[in-house]
Image (tube, helix red, strand yellow):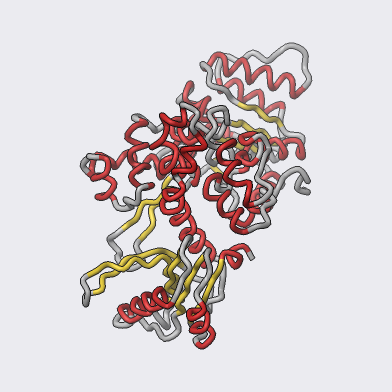
Amino acid sequence: MDKPSSLFARDREWGALDRFVNSPEPDLTLGILSGRRRQGKTFLLQSLTRATGGFYFAAEEATEAESLAQFGQALSDYLQTPGSFTFTSWREAFDQVFDHCRGRTVVIDEFPYLLSASPSLASVIQHQVDSRQQPWNDGGRTRLILCGSAMSVMGGLLNGNAPLRGRASLEMVVKPFDYRTAARFWNADDPRLAMLLHSITGGTPAYRTRFVGHQAPESLEGFDQWVIDRVLDRESPLYREGRYLIASEGGVRNASLYHAVLGAIAAGRHTRAGIAEHCGRQASDLTHALSVLEDCDLIRIEPDAFKANRHLFRISEPLILFYEAVMRPAWSRLELGQAEAVWRESAPKFDSRVMGPHFEQLCRAYVATTDRFGAYPAEVASGTLTDKATRTPIEVDVVATTAADANRPKRLLCVGEAKWGTRMDLHHLARLARVRDLLAAKHDMSETALACFSAKGFSDDLVAAASKDARVHLIMLEDLYR
């Protein structure tokens, strides 16, 4: 099944859907597709139903009776029958849709809306899947795909004792574009412009189209004005998106607490204790909020490369980090229309709280996909270790290790430091060399590379030192996009 030319990238997702709908299984087969809002799930599934001649239904926030009526009308329109199907229950509705759509693909989009009004709906679908997978029931290769943006709800469909656990043959999460694909989507040939755009919009397709009026800065010189006009302007759809991403999640009870947690992380508080101190709460009070934000894929929990019992919380969605670091502290002024002044005054904060951490993260993403350090790493993380001689902590931005095997322990491929706004010199190399010395007591560091990542470039003496030592790698912004 050829991917439509109108569908940008998404080769992996289209291939998985192709295998699912065209698999030889002769029964009713269930697929679950989820992903945060604005990732193009609806466009992807509408393309699928057009390609397969399937039935697509988009649910709305409505009562059960309203949803059944809408479902009946949509099925009637699809089958081109006069009038409308009238259903008194979801069991009756699914009996009819699978009888009339035997051997076809059936897509129900925004499934959490239906589930909210009809909590027993998952059990109804479980009964349909189980009863139509019996030897005497020829399902004719019918495929049912349930899709939704409420990540906590969709994730719960197959968990624990949920009715649909063990019933799905496809479980797909549609993720934002990676940073290289996002650069192509924005037509951003300049790596610096590409990274600046990614630090705000990430890889979310909708933030390139209708959310910014299909406008993109043509060059690096136009970036500042684009931010003022398309992100910080009160009339821009992107202006309130940071708030809506949180409010739209079903598990959110107290939005102010969630913003406080995200604000703490944006301010550099990455541990549970640090977040709790910033919020003025006990660490135990944040358990639910942190769990919901993780389930929604708005934050991620990363292990410390050197301390097994230490974990770091980071914001996954760049727009959320930008909102919490730049927009939320100046919200009153932005509401007064002072976008240009706010952006001008926020430059230092944008560099330190947004671009610095974002550059570090993309450096780790780059290392995770390259074998330039001798092998593809199994894990890439950041870490903190203590220099006992000076009793000071040293933060290491990039630590790449291989997996352990039966014959040898895992190897450290590289330790690295990333600087967005600093031209790196021998001081930074000496710092990494000190890290190597500290780790040598517990690791074989003979083949470990020292990696300097900089968006500003490198001093002449650092370049000279790297030319004499093959274990020293100087990696520029252009390398990340190459």
Left or right, 427 with respect to 169, comes to left
Quarter of the rendering occupied by the C terminus = bottom right
- For this orientation, the residue located farthest to the bottom is 468
Up/down of 433 relative to 121, above or below: below
- Give the percent coordinates (x, y) of residue 67: 57, 18
- Give the percent coordinates (x, y) of residue 86: 64, 13
Residue at the location (31% across, 68% down)?
394
Q: Nearer the viewer, residue 253 or 420?
A: 420
Q: Nearer the viewer, residue 406 or 321?
A: 321
Up/down of 76 relative to 105, above or below: above
Q: Nearer the viewer, residue 59 or 26?
A: 59
- Give the percent coordinates (x, y) of residue 270: 33, 52
- Give the percent coordinates (x, y) of residue 351: 46, 53
Up/down of 314 relative to 82, above or below: below
Count numbered badges in the picture.
0
Res. 297 visible in picture: no
Left or right, 443 with respect to 323, comes to left
Q: Nearer the viewer, residue 39 or 31?
A: 39
Res. 473 visible in picture: yes
Residue at the location (59% across, 36% down)?
230
Residue at the location (70% across, 13% down)?
84
Up/down of 303 relative to 405, above or below: above
Left or right, 437 with respect to 152, comes to left
Residue at the location (48% across, 63% down)?
364
